[in-house]
Amino acid sequence: MSWTVNVSNAIKNNAPKVRKILDEHPYIIDAAKDLRNKKLDVIENIEKYIEQVKINVEASNGHFHFAKTKNDALSIVDSIIKNKNRIVLSKSNVLYEISLREHLSNRDIWETDLGEYLVQIGNDMPSHLVAPAIHLSKDDVAGLLNKNLSNDINKSTSTEEMVRYVREFLMKKYINADVGITGANAVAADTGSIILVENEGNIRMDTVMPRIHIAITGVDKIVPRLSDAFEEAMVQAAYAGFYPPTYINVTSGPSSTGDIELKKVTPATGPAEFHLILLDNGRLDAAKDDLMRESLLCIRCGRCYFSCPAYRLYGKEFGNPPYTGPTGIMWSAITMNDYSKSQLCMHSAGCREVCPMGIDIPKVIEKIKFLDLS
Ligand code: SF4
C-alpha cells in the first residue's frame, strides 16, 4: 500500500476522533489555553524553573542532570549505566534526537512501544510523533515480524495475533532489564515529578521493572506544578485522538515505602535509582527568540501533521526524523540547525488551525525559510 493511502487512512481515523473528544469533553479546549499560558511562563523564566526541578528531584531522592548538548546527555547515560547490558526503551523523540539507540547498540537494547519496535526491527526511522510506524501497512508489518520474530506470522495473521507475538517477546525483555530509559510528557517543577501518558502499558513496565530508571527529556517539558503536568497529559492525549488515555504514569524519585511506622524507606519494589536528564540542545537559545520560542510550546500531539499538504506529499522527508511534519520543521531547526526542509512548506496554514497550543507554525516556518536563505 502506498504512503498516500496509509496517511489518508490515518487522517480518516484521527480527525473525527479528535472532533468527537472535544465535543464530548469541551473542558479540554480550556485546559489547552491554560496550558499555553503556563508553558509561556516557564519559557520566559526557564533558568529559574530548571533550578526548581533540580531541587525537587533531589528532594525526592532522585538524581538530577543537566545536558547542554547531545554528547553531554550520552556521557551522562554512560556514567549511570556503566556495564549494564539489558535495556528497555519507551517511545521518545528525545532519545532519537541524541541517537541513544545507536550509541548503545552493542547492548541488548529494545524499543517497547509497538510502533517503535517495528521501526527498530525494520532499521527504519519514525514517520510521525505519535504513530511512528504510520507508514507501514498491515502487510508490511506481517513481513517484518515474519523475518524478525516468527516464521508463523504471515499476511493472514490477524492484528491481534501480531500484537500478541510482540507482547510475548517484549515481556521477557522487561522482566530481565537492568535499565529502563524513557522520555517524559511533562516535568513538574514544584515536585520534580515526571508524567508519562500511554495506552500500551509498556511505559509502566519500563519505569518499574528495572532497578534503574532514566528519564531524558527537553527543558521545554517543564511546567510549573504537578497539576499542570496532568493537564498536559490530558490535552496531549485528547488532541492525539486517545482520550481518556489508558494510563498516566507519575514518577517522583525511586520506589519507596512508608509501611513501617510511616518512615519513608527507599528503594521498595520498583527502581532503586531514578535519574532525570534535562536536555538543552538549542532549546535555551530558542527561548530567547520572540518567534522561535513558540515552538517550545509544542506538546507533541501530532495533529498538525494531518492538516499539512507537504506532509501528505513528502511523508517523513518533510523534516528530519523524528522531527517531521509542521512541528518537525521547527524542531529540526532548533535541535539540528537544519533549516532546509522548511522550503517544502506550502503555507496552507492548516497546522495553525488545529494546533491546541495556538502556535503560529507558518510564521515560525517563514522565519526558518529566511534563515535557510540568509
Ligand atoms: S505543533 Fe501543535 S499540533 Fe503540532 S504536534 Fe505540536 S502541539 Fe500538536
Image (cartoon, grey):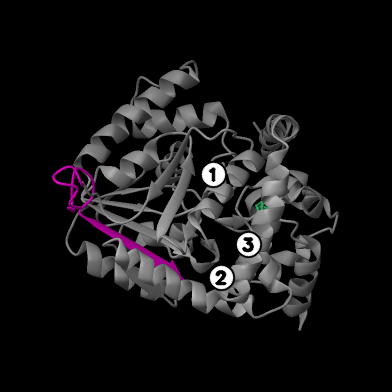
- The residue under label 2 is 335
> What is the x, y in percent for residue 253?
30, 56
- The answer to whether the beta carbon of the residue marked 1 is less than 8 Å from any atom of ligand 1 is no
Residue 38, labelled with which disc? 3
Inspect the magenta stretch and tell me whether residue 262 lies in it: yes
Q: Is residue 305 visible?
A: no
Alpha carbon of mark 3 to alpha carbon of mark 2: how far?
A: 23 Å
- The residue under label 1 is 132
Mark 2: give few (<14), some (14-19) or many (20+) Cα within 10 Å: some
> What is the x, y in percent for residue 104?
30, 59
- Residue found 35% across the figure and 71% down from its top: 65
> What is the x, y in percent for residue 163?
42, 26
- Residue found 37% across the figure and 71% down from its top: 55
Q: Is residue 327 visible?
A: yes
Query: Tag 2 or tag 3, which sits nearer the N-term?
Result: 3
Q: Is residue 171 above or below residue 316?
A: above
Identity, as a three-letter code, of the amino acid under mark 1: Pro
> What is the x, y in percent for residue 174?
26, 39
The quarter of the image holding the C terminus is bottom right
- Residue found 31% across the figure and 72% down from its top: 75
Q: Secondary structure at mark 3?
A: helix
Residue 182, labelled with which disc? none
Q: What's drawn in magenta, residue-wise? A: 258-280
Query: Tag 1 or tag 3, which sits nearer the N-term?
Result: 3
Identity, as a three-letter code, of the amino acid under mark 2: Thr
- The answer to whether the beta carbon of the residue marked 3 is less than 8 Å from any atom of ligand 1 is no
* Tags 3 and 1 touching, CB below 8 Å: no
- The answer to whether the beta carbon of the residue marked 2 is less than 8 Å from any atom of ligand 1 is no
Query: Tag 2 or tag 1, which sits nearer the N-term?
Result: 1
Viewed as shown, does residue 266 lie left or right of 142? left
Viewed as shown, does residue 6 lie left or right of 207? right
